[in-house]
Amino acid sequence: AGASPRLRAWRDRVRALRSRRGAAGD
């Protein structure tokens, strides 16, 4: 609740990174 844009962007980046690694077979 009331997450800052920076935190939201960070979470989005981490999500994309995880998805990438997951797809790579990490």
Image: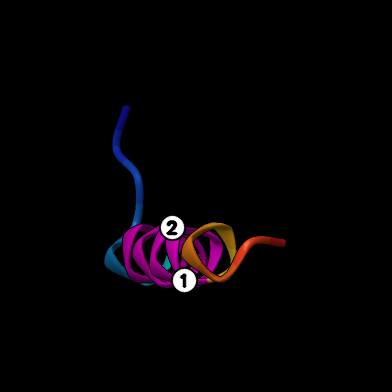
Q: Disc number at residue 15? A: 2
> How many marks do you count on the picture?
2
Q: Could you say where residue 13 lies in the image, as x and y percent from the top left?
A: 42, 72
Q: Secondary structure at mark 1?
A: helix
Could you say which is closer to the camera, residue 14 or residue 3? Answer: 14
Question: Is the N terminus in the top left, top right, bottom left or bottom right quadrant?
Answer: top left
Q: From this view, report whether residue 14 is shown above or below residue 3.
A: below
- Please name the colour scheme applied to the rendered image: rainbow
Could you say which is closer to the camera, residue 23 or residue 16? Answer: 23
Q: Amino acid at mark 2?
A: Arg
Could you say which is closer to the camera, residue 18 or residue 13? Answer: 18
Q: Could you say where residue 24 lies in the image, as x and y percent from the top left?
A: 56, 71
Label 2 Cα neighbours within 10 Å, binned few <14 / some 14-19 / many ≥20: few
Span highlighted in magenta in the image: 8-20
Q: Which residue is mark 1?
A: 20
Q: Is residue 11 magenta?
A: yes
Q: Could you say where residue 21 lies in the image, as x and y percent from the top left?
A: 59, 68
Please report the residue visible at 33 percent of the width from the left and 70 percent of the height from the top. 9
Q: Amino acid at mark 1?
A: Arg
Between disc 1 and disc 2, the foreground one is 1
